[in-house]
Image: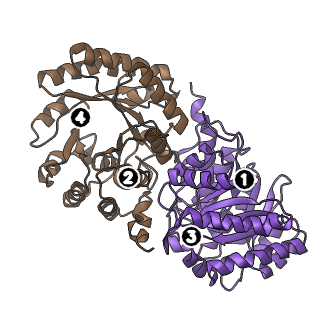
Chain colours: A purple, B brown
Amino acid sequence: MSDFPTFVEFHEEGPREGFQLETVLHPIESRIRFIDALSRTGLRQIQVGSLVNPKKVPTMADTPELFARIEKVASVKYTLLWLNKQGFLKALDVPDVTLEGWLYFYASDALARANNDRSAEQMRQEQLDFVKLYEHHQVPVTTASIMCAFGCNLEGEVSTQRVTDLLSWIREITVGRGHSLPTLMLADTMGWASPERLKQLIGAIRDIEPDIRIGTHIHDTRGLGLANVYAALQMGVDLFDSSVAGLGGCPFASHKAKNTAGNICTEDAVFLCEELGIETGIDLDALIEAAKIVEEILGEQRPGKIMHSGSLSRFRSKK
Amino acid sequence: MSDFPTFVEFHEEGPREGFQLETVLHPIESRIRFIDALSRTGLRQIQVGSLVNPKKVPTMADTPELFARIEKVASVKYTLLWLNKQGFLKALDVPDVTLEGWLYFYASDALARANNDRSAEQMRQEQLDFVKLYEHHQVPVTTASIMCAFGCNLEGEVSTQRVTDLLSWIREITVGRGHSLPTLMLADTMGWASPERLKQLIGAIRDIEPDIRIGTHIHDTRGLGLANVYAALQMGVDLFDSSVAGLGGCPFASHKAKNTAGNICTEDAVFLCEELGIETGIDLDALIEAAKIVEEILGEQRPGKIMHSGSLSRFRSKK
């Protein structure tokens, strides 16, 4: 008996998470072409860029222009990332953006400090300010992410207790204030997750919050990306962050080197779902074409697999 | 409840399957250094090269010299590949080689013709000649491989019936002649396997032969390599062919292109086993060092993941 979901949703992070890691600013026309190709694949959500300090992340500096110039498809939610109040206020002014309230928690104090110059505890407290900010602007609080939920290169193992403690706090600052419990995204920022650990953690979370929607943001740092996706599917997980062509990753987990693994590769994960009989609403061949645009733009071979070997549809028709 | 095996054996195929695909003959000293590094990892079996027509496969021409010059470790079986009687007779003369009788079957007629210029049916019949040859030379018949057991780019889907028909014939020419039933290696030559299909096929085989030992030879062509390994482990499979640094692959499945996926990557698969609490007898960090030698020799980045991100042991000690 399988607990597979019947439909799985992919949130495409490549345009933001991938291009943020780049050391050069690629021509905006190329990036528009890439995102426009993604819009025609059946994806339901695409993160276009982030509203962060342009001096700190120059490759995201033209995000508002990029966002304005992409061709919006009605069935797609186009999102932006912000990490502080300033970024959120900028997002409010972006036409056609889907605004959802995200909260970010850190299971690793060391990563919280490296990423944000603040402790995990400070970050935890500040998320209440974000809830209040979202309330003030009538933006629904939809999602809470836990970074390094499985372990951290900078800090080591992460205990289940650490994650479930954050979960209690998440309930307190959302449900406790009259919101629904947000979707919980377990982020394997440093590539520590393994299939059984993932199942165990999801089981522990459901023991406390049986009805919570759980998604994952898995990095393929140590090669277990799709094995972890398969394990998550076996647990009924129906939401995955991913990046076309395997873009993205965490700069603190050797993801900046050329060609190394980043986020799980959207088209490979979609292929996995298809082969398991799980619907995604995505046209795999169109997605492969979008992945090839990434290689054109970056001028390098990406770690995605099926983009180089081809889907099975054309081979299946042979017999 | 898990059916995980407690110990998993990896048969390293990189030196043969990987270097066979190369278009240049890399210096023999480098390849000796690579194999000697593999010998010190705890691997139990290493396929050193193949005894095939040196005109057809010039990169395997110096296999006898290579075999003679590597430093043999007593706990390691060093094997050679042969595809015809001539090759086998050559192997008989190689000192210190582990001689085991292998049989090769094709679930795809098109691949049988492409690889061997003969039909799958001819190949099937000829395996009886191999059994007789092995009997004559008192070499035990240990393993039967089914190529393209899951599907074939050249031919399309492969039915379960096709595999179980071959299994009946394997029983007839082995058990029917007083041998034990050989280990069955399911080869996903073209990267068609998916986790549930793999489980289904293994289940169908065990319905007929409950006690057969099943191993897999999985190519990571479409990115599902380690998800398939995880599925196989869930079915209790305890034997995997694999290649350090993800070397190898099938020339008919776009594996000759630089940096594309080949065989499942030994060190990534060993890491998966470790994280699942399954023993392999292999020193993961030593294996990563051997993988790095491959990149030095080939002068290219390989698709292996953990060779670039590092094992977790040094990070775990942080807390």
Q: Secondary structure at mark 2?
A: helix
The nearer-to-camera label among 3 and 1 is 1
> Are dots 2 and 3 in contact, CB under 8 Å?
no
* Up/down of B209 relative to A8, above or below: above
Residue under circle 3? Answer: A250
Q: Residues within 10 Å of mark 3 (few under 14, many from 20)?
A: many
- For the residues marked 1 and 4, what is the alpha-carbon distance in whole angstroms? 54 Å
Report x, y in % for residue A73: 83, 55
> Are dots 4 and 3 in contact, CB under 8 Å?
no
The image quadrant of residue B117 is: top left
Image quadrant occupied by the N terminus of chain A: top right
- For the residues marked 2 and 3, what is the alpha-carbon distance in whole angstroms? 23 Å
Q: Secondary structure at mark 1?
A: loop
| Disc marking residue B270 | 2
Question: Is the residue at mark 1 from the same chain as the one at mark 2?
Answer: no
> Are dots 2 and 4 in contact, CB under 8 Å?
no
Upstream in sequence: badge 2 or badge 4: 4
| Disc marking residue B82 | 4
Q: Nearer the viewer, residue A284 or A234?
A: A234
Which amino acid type corresponds to the residue marked 3 in the rendered image? Cys
Residue under circle 1? Answer: A213
Which amino acid type corresponds to the residue marked 4 in the rendered image? Trp
| Disc marking residue B313 | none
Question: Is the residue at mark 2 from the same chain as the one at mark 4?
Answer: yes
The nearer-to-camera label among 1 and 2 is 1
* Up/down of A27 relative to A215, above or below: below
Which amino acid type corresponds to the residue marked 1 in the rendered image? Arg
Report x, y in % for residue B134: 17, 24
- For the residues marked 3 and 1, what is the alpha-carbon distance in whole angstroms? 24 Å
The nearer-to-camera label among 4 and 3 is 3
